[in-house]
């Protein structure tokens, strides 16, 4: 029993294996050099395209450490290789045999051998404090007192006033983390991971250490609990967008009470990397869709994070922010749909598009650069922007008068796709984030029949039973 | 008995004087000389201005980044003048840098290896982010309630101070191997006292204009005036 306990109690980093740097070199050259460079200086052929840039191993500066000093442990490096860096171009290399990954750890260390002469010292965190309403409240107080919002924004959406000024130690612009999306946190999103990042900072970036810069050591955990309370417990990506039937008028105001009552369908977006110019570092990775319809119109409520509200300034590589819903012009039976990337020469798509400063338009597209506005547009919309987030309502009549735009019908699986542009991040034209086709379904209207039919059935059943009983009694 | 004490005191005194005499450049002693350096720059001052988008009640609405400050008679401010070759007492010179008005005050400070005191008198968050090679880099948050932090800079080198919250904030800490240094004032002058007599190479360093050197001879009890012109 004791042996078992001892095994369990051994911290994971003691399990580190000594790798063979020579064997690691071969793996490195095949798998890593493309981004990190042959010399480990972070200047591989693909580096130019990536943001954040690949790590320069020659400096020995590593973002993710569980150590109190500047050197990461072997286990830290192994974990980063194994799990990748969420929200960046660094993928998980769990596909490689474990032996190869330990060999890589050994080889990567040779790029900054001097730095690794120092033995890593484990960071001791204050005693863990479980999450509770009280702890979250204290965390919020501390969040405000230590001014996390300066970079991370008042509600944690990476829209703080210092955002635009931030640079890493190599002089490249670097974005603060959006604290409402824990699944993108570099170095993991467990409570211990978050507390470690807070205590230890993220080396080479503007994120400083806070272990000695909070009022009480416990505050590290209160902050952790508060940060985890900022986002949803799970992203719960939707596969089908349900449009709720309502009998009343649908509000234009994105902050109206109706929208909070509807289920948010979270849709994940990817960078467009099929046609030039490609978008390897998409800024918008999630849009929450709520939708409702009544007997006259259909309305879409879209929520997405964008840390900057931008206008067209092409000289500075800044463009308007935009979002679009895409449908086939006609909803045909069967599975045939136009090309998901905004249609092609033969099959057009219909777009409901909103752009900052311009409002809503209806358009026909035959590809990402061939968008033509539809004359006599009937769609309207209203957007609000606050604390790094857009909320938008787009409305349109249910029934279309011409063949360029679809008519929405209940209970029909309607193809839908989404595209989004963060103009502040230089996204415009084909440089966008997008989805492939999803389905939208208008829930069947709930008629009054459901209140009539069951009682009628019940009454008839009772009547039949009474008849049966009477007949039986007569015979007797 | 009294004689014995007298003799002991006499020996102690002589020994003490001997020890003092053996220490080159004792503090306040007549044995050392003084260097008065006049650092000049013939070029124009370099000042960058930036609109401030936050904390304006503390930082003001415009940040002024002074890359080259030239005073009267072309005197260059914020240059570190030092005598690297002088062998001196291990007299520690501590330094204090305040973060005041979203500026590092003083802009350039010099110290001997040891502790640096960092103050935050702004009542807002700053983060001390240092750029160094010999000393471990520091990136520590200093929230409003943390008025003073003490950090160690134990190896001689010039350390850059920045703040990521207010990206225009820039300061320099020159960690010098010996206590024979000075930072030029608004008129470009700096005084180095108690330098052990000898022939040295005087060094002047400026954040934008780099380094210049000049040979100098220091004589006991005398003041040596040196003019150094910085060039781009």
Image (tube, rainbow, N blue to C red):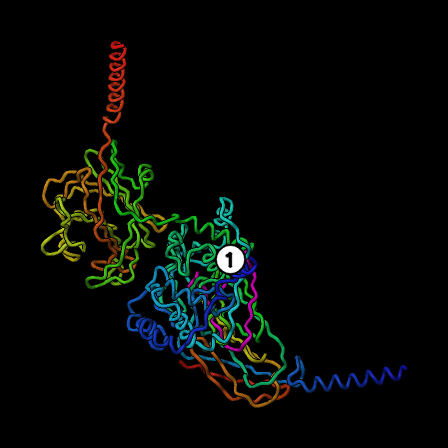
Determine if the magenta segment contains residue B148.
yes
Classify A253 as above or below A229.
Answer: above
Q: Which residues are magenta?
A: B139-168
Residue A25's quadrant in the figure? bottom left
Residue at horizontal 43 percent and vertical 48 percent from the top: A229
Classify B70 as above or below A413.
Answer: below
- Report the front residue among A241 and A27: A27
Residue A57 relative to residue A282: left or right: right
Residue A347 relative to residue A3: left or right: left
Residue A42: x percent and y percent?
35, 72
Residue B164: x percent and y percent?
43, 63
* One can see residue A72 in this view: no
| Quadrant location of the N terminus of chain B in the rendered image | bottom right
Please name the residue that numbered disc 1 is placed on. Answer: B143
Classify A182 as above or below A467.
Answer: below
How many marks do you count on the picture? 1
- Report the front residue among A41 and B66: A41
Classify B113 as above or below A1.
Answer: below
Task: Tell me the chain of label 1.
Answer: B
Residue A317: x percent and y percent?
26, 62
Residue A48: x percent and y percent?
29, 70
* One can see residue A323 in this view: yes
- Report the front residue among A66 and A141: A66
Residue placed furthest toward the front: A476
């Amino acid at each position: 029993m004791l042996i078992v306990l001892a095994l369990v109690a051994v911290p994971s980093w003691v399990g580190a294996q000594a790798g063979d740097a020579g064997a690691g070199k071969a793996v490195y050259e095949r798998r890593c050099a493309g981004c990190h460079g042959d010399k480990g200086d972070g200047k591989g052929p693909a580096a130019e395209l990536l943001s954040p840039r690949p790590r320069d191993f020659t400096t020995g500066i590593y973002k993710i450490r569980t150590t109190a000093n500047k050197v990461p442990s072997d286990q830290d490096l192994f974990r980063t290789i194994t799990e990748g860096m969420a929200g960046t171009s660094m993928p998980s290399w769990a596909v490689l045999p474990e032996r190869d990954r330990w060999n890589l750890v050994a080889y990567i260390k040779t790029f900054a051998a001097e730095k690794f002469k120092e033995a890593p010292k484990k960071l001791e965190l204050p005693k863990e404090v479980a999450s509770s309403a009280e702890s979250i409240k204290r965390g919020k107080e501390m969040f405000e007192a230590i001014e996390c919002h300066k970079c991370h924004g008042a509600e944690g959406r990476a829209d703080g006033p210092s955002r635009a000024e931030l640079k890493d130690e190599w002089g490249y612009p670097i974005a603060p983390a959006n604290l409402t999306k824990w699944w993108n946190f570099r170095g993991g999103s467990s409570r211990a991971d978050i507390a470690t990042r807070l205590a230890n900072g993220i080396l080479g970036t503007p994120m400083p250490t806070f272990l000695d810069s909070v009022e009480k050591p416990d505050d590290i955990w209160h902050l952790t609990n508060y940060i985890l309370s900022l986002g949803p417990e799970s992203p719960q990506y939707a596969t089908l967008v349900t449009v709720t039937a309502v009998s009343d008028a649908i509000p234009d105001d994105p902050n109206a009470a109706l929208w909070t009552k509807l289920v948010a369908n979270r849709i994940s977006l990817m960078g467009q990397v099929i046609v030039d110019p490609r978008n390897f570092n998409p800024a918008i990775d999630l849009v929450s869709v709520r939708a409702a319809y009544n007997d006259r119109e259909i309305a879409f409520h879209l929520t997405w994070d964008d840390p900057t509200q931008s206008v067209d300034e092409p000289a500075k590589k800044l463009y308007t922010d935009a979002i679009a819903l895409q449908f086939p012009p006609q909803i045909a039976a069967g599975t045939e749909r136009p090309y998901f990337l905004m249609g092609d020469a033969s099959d057009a798509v219909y777009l409901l598009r909103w752009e900052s400063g311009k409002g809503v338009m209806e358009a026909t597209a035959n590809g990402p650069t061939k968008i033509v506005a539809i004359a006599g547009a009937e769609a309207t919309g209203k957007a609000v922007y606050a604390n790094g987030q857009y909320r938008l309502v787009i409305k349109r009549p249910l029934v279309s008068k011409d063949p360029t735009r679809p008519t929405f019908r209940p209970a029909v699986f309607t193809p839908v796709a989404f595209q989004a542009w963060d103009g502040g991040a230089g996204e415009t034209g084909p440089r966008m984030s997008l989805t492939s086709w999803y389905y939208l379904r208008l829930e069947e209207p709930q008629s009054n029949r459901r209140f009539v039919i069951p009682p009628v059935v019940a009454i008839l059943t009772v009547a039949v039973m009474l008849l049966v009983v009477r007949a039986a009694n007569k015979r007797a | 008995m009294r004689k014995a004490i007298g003799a002991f005191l006499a020996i102690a005194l002589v020994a003490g004087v001997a020890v003092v005499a053996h220490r080159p450049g004792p503090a306040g002693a007549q044995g050392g000389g003084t260097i008065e350096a006049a650092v000049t720059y013939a070029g124009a001052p370099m000042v960058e201005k930036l609109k401030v988008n936050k904390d304006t009640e503390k930082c003001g609405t415009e940040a002024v980044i002074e890359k080259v400050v030239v005073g009267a008679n072309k005197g260059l401010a914020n240059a570190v003048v030092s005598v690297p070759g002088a062998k001196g007492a291990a007299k520690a010179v501590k330094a204090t840098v305040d973060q005041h008005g979203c500026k590092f005050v003083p802009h350039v400070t010099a110290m001997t290896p040891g502790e640096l005191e960092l103050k935050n008198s702004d009542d807002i968050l700053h983060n001390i982010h240092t750029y160094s090679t010999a000393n471990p880099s520091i990136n520590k948050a200093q929230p409003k309630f943390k008025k003073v932090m003490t950090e160690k800079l134990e190896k001689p080198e010039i350390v850059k101070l920045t703040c990521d919250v207010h990206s225009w904030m820039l300061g320099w800490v020159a960690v010098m191997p010996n206590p024979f240094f000075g930072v030029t004032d608004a008129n470009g002058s700096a005084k180095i006292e108690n330098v052990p007599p000898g022939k040295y190479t005087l060094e002047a360093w400026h954040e934008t204009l780099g380094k210049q050197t000049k040979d100098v001879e220091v004589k006991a009890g005398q003041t040596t005036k040196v003019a150094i012109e910085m060039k781009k």
